[in-house]
Image (cartoon, grey):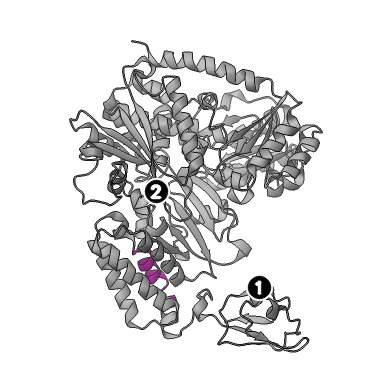
Amino acid sequence: MAKPIDELARIRQSALKRFSEKRGKARIRITVGSATCENAAGADAVYEKFVELLRPHSDVIVHRVGCTGKCDMEPIVVVITEGKIPTKYIKMTPERAERVVKSHILGGKICEEFSMRHIAGFGDAERMVSVCGGPNCRRDRNNDVVKVFQNFIKKHGLSGKVAVIHSACPGICKEGPQAFIHPDCVVYKALTPEIIEKIVVEHLGQNNIVKSNVSDSSYVSNRFFPLFGDIDYFTRQLRITLRNCGVIDPESLEDYFSVRGYEALAKVLQEMTPAQVIDAIKTSGLRGRGGGGYPTGLKWAGAASIQSDIKYMICNADEGDPGAFMDRSAIEGDPHSILEGMAIAGYAVGSNTGYIYIRAEYPLAIKRLRHAIKQAEELNLLGENILGSGFSFKIDIRLGAGAFVCGEETALIHSIQGQRGMPRPRPPYPAVHGLWGKPTVINNVETWANVPPIILNGAEWFASIGTEGSKGTKVFALAGKVKNTGLVEVPMGTTLREIIYDIGGGIKGDRKFKAAQTGGPSGGCIPEKYLDTPIDYESLQQAGSMMGSGGLIVMDEDTCMVDIAKFFLGFTQDESCGKCTPCREGTKRLLEILTRISEGSGVPDDLWKLERLCHTVQRASLCGLGRSAPNPVLSTLTHFRDEYEAHIFEKRCPAGACLALLRYYIDPDKCVGCTLCARVCPVSCISGSPKTVHVIDQEKCIHCGQCYEKCRFDAIEKR
């Protein structure tokens, strides 16, 4: 029997030879972000323009990568030149691509006006030092590593040439404090003021690496850092799930090999027993990232202990939360890591068959998954007798029709079986009685993506990241009233304040923070007093919310919490499968009450009715989706009861967001009679002659706000 590690080495050698031939001659490499969102922003046209302009230049290559997660700056293009910090260009267009080629690629001059680093204020620094900002490395407040670096850089005349910033904890606390030097890709460990001065003088000043303090760790999660660790938004993240997104070409198996792809699978097939694999996952503390947070190792162990001729692995990629796109981006940017994680679990549990259940609205993710499966099968990384080990595992794809309830595992199983996607009571749990009555392990995309790094880096490494009860990292889709939107992956235990203000850049327009919604429609709204809550499963529950799959929506002072509760209730009510009465009827009644309150027709008894009905739906619903549906209502009632009371007793929306309660008035002292408001009004409810004060007919006004937005003289008031 062949040794899987040797067999993989043989396959990789051939593949990496092609990879080297393709990349080795390149003086410059250009990557174009190419995920669904970036393509919608014009990435395809940008890619084609670069290819067209650089076709005569054999020393420059252009290829696609997955999404980096910086949504507000897409499409993103990275120019990589040996020995220099990679240049990130934002909001690229074909016209900007022409300028980059002419000025930067051919002329050697960076287009500063749309370079991410220059916008971030790092100017012309030739090197950057990213200092670990983890709690262990920063425990000595009198010996701040960043300040020590800055002082010595100034002392030795390197100001302007070297910039210093904080980074996220890489999870190697035993080697801390640490610092990463860009673009040299050198990590220094066990930093003291004496060592730091030596690094500044010899490395930053004389280009001589201080070998005595170089860390030799090669953790898989660090692959993202050399390319993006010089930008504040990225450097404060620790990417494990998204480690290859924006780094590799998701349609190139050679690229995946270059970042140690399939090494973890070969390792478990040759060196570990199934029980040892399960023990490693248990030791790591990995919990299901789909929302419930059930320990992954225990789930695998339960399925492994059942005697059955057939067992199944399922990847739940049915991402249905409003504003959530973590799983889609992970698949589009790094599909092979999902396949590898599932194959490892199949070996551990004793399964030969896996299914990826993904909604049909994700065509690019589906395309890349199918391509990755075909590539893996051709090289014997999936299929029969994988790498000569005797273990066989195949993966197939099943498309969902977009029902939110199919994110619940028993409903998902029914859908794969060709039945209507409706939950069933548990127990029995899928690990005992799942797909077609056989033991089945279901984990979501993020969970599967964490498996290969755990095997390669070690369970203890993963367990060292995060909190006592919540290990590793978590990916969030940061959206709403925040300056920096996109995908954020941070160690468990990171506070909401750090995510919203350090990574997210704070509230748009520097307005006042009001609440953060975590956990999607099943989560709750967390007010300002909980901003320093560490993000882990237990802490979020205590704050009245939940982890969920990873949606994180930030709200400012202009957000109405009654309206937010109504929005999420409207979503869950519409997506209810209708099987059980408490969810089907209860969410409908809740939505009716919320609608009545938001329209100014609420009565005092509505508050009591809301609370009682919420608790009834929680206790009596069949599945987890129904039981968690009232969470947005209960959390807003708990933390923002005064807003409900204002709607009911004063017929007033404090945030000015509920249209039925809004009134627009024209201030006669400011109105100059320009007639613009009357011209934009869709129902012609504004009257007045040119150069005379105008008046709004309140009976006709539909509260659309067009006049308020268009008035140039601030003459229209919103009350």
What kind of element bears circle 1?
helix
The residue closer to the viewer here, 493 or 255, is 255
User: Number of numbered discs present?
Assistant: 2
Q: Judge whether residue 172 can be spotted in this image.
A: no
Magenta stretch: dominant secondary structure: helix
Q: Amino acid at mark 2?
A: Ala
The residue closer to the viewer here, 357 or 66, is 357
Q: Position of residue 90 (x, y in %)?
A: 67, 45
Q: Is residue 376 above or below residue 40?
A: above
Residue corresponding to mark 2: 401
Residue shown at 52%/73% (left/top)? Answer: 657
Left or right, residue 305 beside residue 686: left
Residue corresponding to mark 1: 709
> Which region shows up in magenta?
630-643
Q: Amino acid at mark 1?
A: Glu
The quadrant in which residue 460 appears is top left
Q: Judge whether residue 354 can be spotted in this image.
A: yes
Real-space CA distance between mark 1 and mark 2, rounded to the nearest whole angstrom: 39 Å
Residue shown at 27%/39% (left/top)? Answer: 299
In terms of sequence position, does the residue under pointer 1 or pointer 2 come before the other? 2
Q: Are marks 1 and 2 in contact (CB under 8 Å)?
A: no
Eye-nearest disc, 1 or 2:
2
Left or right, residue 441 beside residue 164: left
Q: Position of residue 67 (x, y in %)?
A: 56, 41
Q: Is residue 21 above or below residue 227?
A: above
The quadrant in which residue 349 appears is top left
Q: Position of residue 134 (x, y in %)?
A: 50, 43
The quarter of the picture where the C terminus appears is bottom right
Question: Is 719 one of the magenta-colored residues?
Answer: no
What kind of element bears circle 2?
loop
The residue closer to the viewer here, 712 or 275, is 712
